[in-house]
């Protein structure tokens, strides 16, 4: 009955969840059960690629939640994604143990290389999985809390907020490029060996990580959906449409925005944490302002203000990116640039808006 | 007696006599010079030293050349006739010039000539003699260089030369150098009163040699009173050095600020006056820089003038691109700033890729005209490089030109009217669409001009615009949107703050600190340093 109601209120979401469910069954079977000689066999590379797209989709979902529903355009969401990734990377780095090039059981390779004598205090605890997972949530959440608390309280909105979030991720990128920071500097972290004792190169681990991404995306989608449909969600949409009016009616706008911003940052952090073990590297270029802006275009292409639209946009644009960069490397930036221009002018509601002319959902 | 000796008529007579002697007896005089030159070719080093001094005393104009050649080990003698020659190395042998007459003597093999050997003592003597000769040169620049060489190299023998040169010298900065050189030598005097006087002369002098010598004196000085004076003098010097190094930091800061301002000032118009977020602004700067490159390709023989051509060319190229962007994209998106941001970001990607595919993905080399290199030396501790100085001036020029356009022309009046109240401006007959396009073109053109300036400072490549876009936005937001003065103050203070932080935090950390500072500042004053007041503040 609950499912039925869900289907009626959110048809697109239901299709999305069904699709994810199908993916969760078909992909592992095609990869693990179907023999490699069969044309239906799915290579581990493809599994990882789809897993990567799903992480991006989760990130897009996080951004759509604040941009589409609350009107907060963050050009720095890549920073939360990267921070989550770094927390995971630190855990994976500690798991290498003495299997690194220098064979130091205590210090990661890059620290040995830089002649560090002992582990910096902020690396303590990252050898424990639960601690690292806590940090995946806490670090982006805390940064978002501090940043949002300052910004929303002094009513920095719109373009100004967009620009300072961009400055934030730019500053973080510069900081992480520094070797002295103790996060691997320019090269970041890579050469991961295993996670929770399972070999990262093994097919089964890859499939497990893929399944984790599917689950994370599905759960996050339902959670976002739940927030949007709750009373809280109505206030949030009201803030998007008329911030001052909502404030005068008596809602403490800053608190709602801050809460949502932190939640979105945490989702982005989780996406980053799932992303790193699958791609096998994390470096400061993840903080690049370009990444954060690209993320915005995924959401815009899919259709902002519709959660499944963001997911769809992320999957489509990233598939196109993979295809174009391999087939026509010169053309990709042209295509991406044109996408930005055309979508904003001709498709303000994104692809989803194309076939959903008159929906029941609140439109942006 | 004196009166008679300096009587004008007598002076004239003596001049005429000298002329007569010169005309009548050219051969003996030259013969004496020739002998003096050949005398350099003796075995004994002490005799060589005498010969050098004797040669210098002849006063012939070729002396400097010969002594310099001797110092550079280019003075040889021919084995066949033992004539002293100046050689120039060529493939497989030497090209010879007669030292005394300057006559070309053709080329010979390596074995036909032999070097006139010198030792370190002679080298010192040669340097001193050359300095002495150049101290009496007619060319002030040669005298200046020579005086500089004499700093810390004055011996008992050369002291009278310097004193004599000082008495004749009229240029104040050369006089100062000579006085410093003499005082430096007086520091080693036996007489404490003389040392004291020397310290007083040297007090506050910025030449590095002075500080070294005073420090050495401080270690050796037995006289406590004198040591105290010397310590005070060193303290003064160090204070002055600190002051000038601070001035240098401020100059570097202002020059960084002027770069920031140039990059941001076009944005201050498009963002500040029109409220359009143009993320392609950096790429318009890049187009300006590439225009400079193209202009230099078109006129490879007139690099000095290329900048003058490039400035209007870049203004037009970037301005046209800007107008095209406004007409083609932005006008559909007025009132939707976030969408404008995204669309113009797409434009920036397109422009970058356009340059990458049509020109090159690599950086291109833009040449610097000669008049932009070198530096303006204010004193021993402070010198300002010309390119930074010119860019500072250029930036001010652009700023005030823009100010003038906005305040004094009818276009400026219309721009301001549309910015303040679009509907009312249209009701008064202003073609607001045309004004939009022109304003955007103006801002974009200024970005192109900034690109010309930046091409002289940094690498020119497809990505160069990206490096400036965040900084430019920071400047505009920090200064206060819609306010050119705000952009000026913002850019300069950010530049200076960056350079002051740099020595103790490192370049990257300084940048991070400045960014964090701006982020916090925006929280405190969301409308920047100079917020707009009144009605226009609300939208």
Image (cartoon, coloured by chain):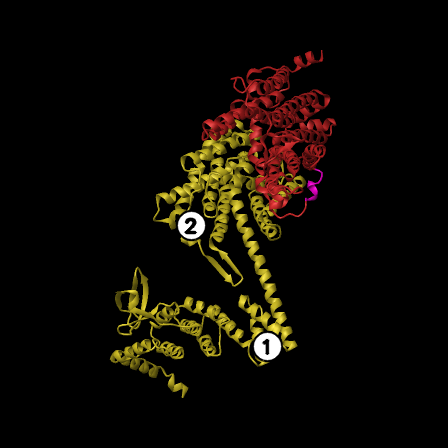
Q: Which residue is mark 2?
A: B368
Say which colour chain A has. Answer: red
Picture quadrant where residue B233 is located = bottom right
Which chain does the residue under circle 1 lie in? B
Image quarter where the N terminus of chain A lies is top right
Residue B390 horizontal side relative to residue A24, left or right: left
Give above or below for A33 relative to A96. above
Dot 2 crowding, Cα within 10 Å, few <14, some 14–19, many 20+: some
Tell me the subunit letter for badge 2. Answer: B
Report the Cα–Cα distance between label 1 and label 2. Answer: 49 Å
Q: Quadrant of the C terminus of chain A?
A: top right
Residue A214 appears anywhere in the view: yes
Residue bounds of the magenta highlight: A119-125
- Please name the residue shown 40% across and 79% down the image: B46
Residue B101 sits in which quadrant? bottom left
The percent coordinates of residue A59 (x first, y second) are: 62, 28
Q: Nearer the viewer, residue A289 or B411?
A: A289
* SS under mark 2: loop
Residue B118 part of the magenta-drawn span: no
Disc 1 and disc 2 in contact, CB within 8 angstroms = no
**In the rendered view, does A243 fall on the left or right side of B375?**
right
- Residue A122: say if magenta: yes
x, y percent for residue A117:
66, 48
In x, y percent, where is residue B533? 62, 39
Indicate the chain coloured yellow by its letter.
Answer: B
């Amino acid at each position: 009955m609950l499912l039925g109601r869900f289907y009626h209120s959110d048809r697109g979401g239901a299709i999305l969840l069904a699709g994810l469910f199908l993916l969760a069954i078909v992909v592992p079977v095609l990869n693990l059960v179907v023999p490699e000689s069969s044309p239906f066999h799915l290579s581990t590379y493809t599994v990882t690629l789809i897993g990567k797209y799903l992480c991006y989709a989760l990130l897009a979902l996080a951004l759509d939640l604040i941009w589409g529903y609350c009107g907060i355009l963050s050009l720095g969401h890549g920073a939360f994604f990267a921070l989550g990734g770094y927390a995971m990377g630190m855990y994976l780095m500690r798991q290498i143990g003495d299997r690194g090039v220098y064979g130091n059981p205590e210090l990661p390779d890059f620290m040995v290389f830089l002649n560090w004598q002992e582990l910096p205090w902020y690396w303590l605890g990252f050898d424990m999985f639960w601690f690292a997972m806590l940090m995946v949530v806490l670090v982006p959440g805390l940064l978002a809390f501090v940043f949002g608390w300052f910004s929303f309280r002094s009513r920095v909105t719109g373009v100004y907020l967009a620009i300072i979030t961009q400055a934030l991720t730019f500053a973080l990128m510069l900081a992480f490029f520094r070797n002295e920071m103790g996060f691997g500097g320019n090269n970041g972290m890579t050469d991961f060996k295993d996670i929770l004792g399972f070999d990262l190169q093994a097919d089964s681990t890859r499939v497990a990580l893929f399944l984790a991404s599917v689950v994370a995306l599905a759960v996050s989608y339902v959670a976002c959906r739940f927030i949007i449909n709750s009373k809280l969600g109505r206030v949030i949409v009201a803030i998007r449409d008329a911030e001052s009016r909502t404030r005068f009616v008596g809602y403490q706008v800053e608190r709602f925005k801050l809460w949502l911003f932190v939640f979105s940052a945490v989702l982005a952090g989780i996406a980053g944490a799932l992303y790193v073990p699958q791609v096998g590297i994390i470096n400061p270029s993840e903080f690049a302002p370009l990444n954060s802006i690209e993320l915005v275009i995924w959401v815009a292409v899919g259709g902002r203000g519709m959660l499944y639209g963001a997911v769809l946009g992320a999957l489509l644009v990233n598939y196109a990116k993979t295809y174009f960069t391999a087939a026509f490397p010169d053309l990709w930036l042209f295509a991406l640039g044109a996408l930005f221009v055309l979508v904003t002018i001709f498709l303000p509601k994104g692809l989803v808006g194309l076939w959903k002319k008159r929906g029941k959902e609140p439109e942006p | 007696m004196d009166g008679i000796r300096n009587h004008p008529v007598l002076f004239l007579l003596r001049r005429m006599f000298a002329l007569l002697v010169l005309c009548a007896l050219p051969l003996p005089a030259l013969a004496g010079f020739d002998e003096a030159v050949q005398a350099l070719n003796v075995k004994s080093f002490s005799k060589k030293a005498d010969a050098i001094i004797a040669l210098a005393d002849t006063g012939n104009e070729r002396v400097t050349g010969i002594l310099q050649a001797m110092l550079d080990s280019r003075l040889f003698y021919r084995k066949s006739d033992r004539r002293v020659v100046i050689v120039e190395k060529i493939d497989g042998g030497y090209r010879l010039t007669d030292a005394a007459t300057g006559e070309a003597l053709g080329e010979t093999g390596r074995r036909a000539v032999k070097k006139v050997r010198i030792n370190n003592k002679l080298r010192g003597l040669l340097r001193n003699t050359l300095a002495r000769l150049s101290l009496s040169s007619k060319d002030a620049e040669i005298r200046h260089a020579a005086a500089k060489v004499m700093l810390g190299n004055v011996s008992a023998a050369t002291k009278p030369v310097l004193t004599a040169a000082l008495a004749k010298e009229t240029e104040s900065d050369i006089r100062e150098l000579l006085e410093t050189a003499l005082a430096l030598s007086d520091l080693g005097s036996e007489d404490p009163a003389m040392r004291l006087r020397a310290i007083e002369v040297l007090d506050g002098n910025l030449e590095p040699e002075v500080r070294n010598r005073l420090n050495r004196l401080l270690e050796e000085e037995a006289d406590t009173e004198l040591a105290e004076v010397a310590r005070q003098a060193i303290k003064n010097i160090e204070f002055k050095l600190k002051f000038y190094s601070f001035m240098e930091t401020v100059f570097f800061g202002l020059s960084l600020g002027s770069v920031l301002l140039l990059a941001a000032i076009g944005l201050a118009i498009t963002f500040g006056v029109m409220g359009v977020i143009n993320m392609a602004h950096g790429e318009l700067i890049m187009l300006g820089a590439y225009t400079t490159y193209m202009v230099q390709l078109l006129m490879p023989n007139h690099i000095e003038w290329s900048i003058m051509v490039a400035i209007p060319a870049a203004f037009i190229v970037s301005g046209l691109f800007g107008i095209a962007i406004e007409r083609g994209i932005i006008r559909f998106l007025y009132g939707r700033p976030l969408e404008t941001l995204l669309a113009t970001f797409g434009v920036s990607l397109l422009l970058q890729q356009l340059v990458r595919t049509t020109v090159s993905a690599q950086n291109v080399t833009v040449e610097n005209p000669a008049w932009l290199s070198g530096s303006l030396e204010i004193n021993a501790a402070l010198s300002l490089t010309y390119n930074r100085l010119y860019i500072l001036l250029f930036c001010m020029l652009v700023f005030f030109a823009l100010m003038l356009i906005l305040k004094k022309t009818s276009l400026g009046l219309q721009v301001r009217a549309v910015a303040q109240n679009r509907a009312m401006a249209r009701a008064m007959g202003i073609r607001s669409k045309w004004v939009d396009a022109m304003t955007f073109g103006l801002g974009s053109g200024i970005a192109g001009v900034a690109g010309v300036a930046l091409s002289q400072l940094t690498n020119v490549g497809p990505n160069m615009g990206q490096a400036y876009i965040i900084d430019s936005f920071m400047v505009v937001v920090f200064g206060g949107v819609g306010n050119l003065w705000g952009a000026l103050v913002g850019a300069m203070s950010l530049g200076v703050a960056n350079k002051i932080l740099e020595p103790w935090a490192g370049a990257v950390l300084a940048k991070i600190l400045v960014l964090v500072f701006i982020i916090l500042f925006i929280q405190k004053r969301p409308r920047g340093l100079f917020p707009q007041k009144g009605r226009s503040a609300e939208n």
